[in-house]
Amino acid sequence: MRKFWKFLAATGKMAGFMLLSLLLIILVAEGYTNYKANEHCHHKTEACRMGDVGLVLGCSKLFSSGQPSLYFTGRMEAAARLWKSGRLSCIIVSGDNREIYYNEPRDMKNALVKLGVPADKIVCDYAGLRTFDSVVRARHIFGADKITIISQSYHVKRAVTIARHLGIDAEGFCASRIPFNRPTLARQFIRERAARVAMLFDLTIGHNPRHMGERIPLPL
């Protein structure tokens, strides 16, 4: 019986150590994200620079319920607003295209054209499988050195952190916030904390995108 209690005590200590380590990593990821990105993320159009390449991060145009995605709509409207204000020289729409009937870049381009952005000023990045991949490819595939990243605020901060850590001159423009209920917001909060820990891991080990390839010129 004594061995059993010793085993429980040792297990409890190990679990406590692992929990504290995880909390420390989450705090480091959160602190680094805020340090790198806070002063470079904007909510007002006039705060953004002129002449940047826009990078719109992909998401599905529909929720799992089949309803139009407010994330998608908010990002497209934000990108179109920046374009119409003359802030952007062209726009990269970067997202997932792994399945034949699912094509985020195509859907984003179509939506932006409907909002008044010229089709010949939009370039599709079909290999933006993750935020990290989209940011790295914007520079190494499309040659964009000054970019304005467009997404919701929590997502923009992470993307700007990745970019600036890698030496890319990046700013962020925050799309409209989504009015969700508390359980949904809680899930979103937890997912983003996990994503920032994964970002820290990518930046620490020098991770590379899944797909690279030859340079693609931008219509500047």
Image: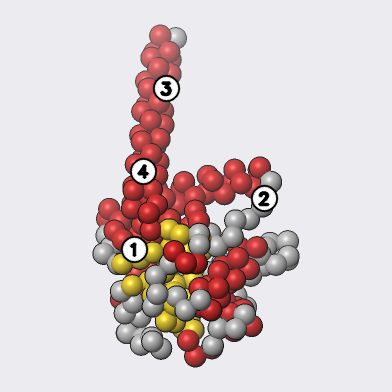
| Foreground of the two, 41 or 188 | 41
Kindly identify the residue that appears in the image at 40 percent across and 35 percent down: 23
Quick one: label 3 or label 1, which is nearer the N terminus?
Answer: 3
Tell me, for residue 12, which label it has, or none. 3
Label 2 is placed on what type of residue?
Phe
Residue 4 sits above or below residue 59 on the image: above
Task: Provide the residue designation for mark 4.
Answer: 31
Tell which tag, 2 or 3, sits nearer the viewer: 2
Residue at the top extreme of this rendering = 2
Residue at the front extreme of this rendering = 46
Residues at circles 3 and 1 in contact by the CB criterion of under 8 Å: no
Quick one: label 2 or label 3, which is nearer the N terminus?
Answer: 3
Quick one: label 1 or label 4, which is nearer the N terminus?
Answer: 4
Label 1 is placed on what type of residue?
Ala
Residue 108 sits above or below residue 45 on the image: below
Question: Label 1's element?
Answer: helix
Would residue 122 be seen by someone viewing this image from the given angle? yes
Residues at circles 2 and 3 in contact by the CB criterion of under 8 Å: no
The quarter of the picture where residue 149 lies is: bottom left
Label 3 is placed on what type of residue?
Gly
Tell which tag, 3 or 4, sits nearer the viewer: 4
User: Residue 107's spot in the image, x, y percent?
Assistant: 60, 78
Assess disc 2: are there few (<14), some (14-19) or many (≥20) residues with their C-alpha within 10 Å of its C-alpha.
few
CA separation in Å, label 4 and label 2: 25 Å
Task: Provide the residue designation for mark 2.
Answer: 180
Quick one: label 3 or label 4, which is nearer the N terminus?
Answer: 3
Left-right relation of 60 to 199: right
CA separation in Å, label 3 and label 1: 40 Å
| Foreground of the two, 68 or 117 | 117
Tell me, for residue 53, which label it has, or none. none
Task: Provide the residue designation for mark 1.
Answer: 163
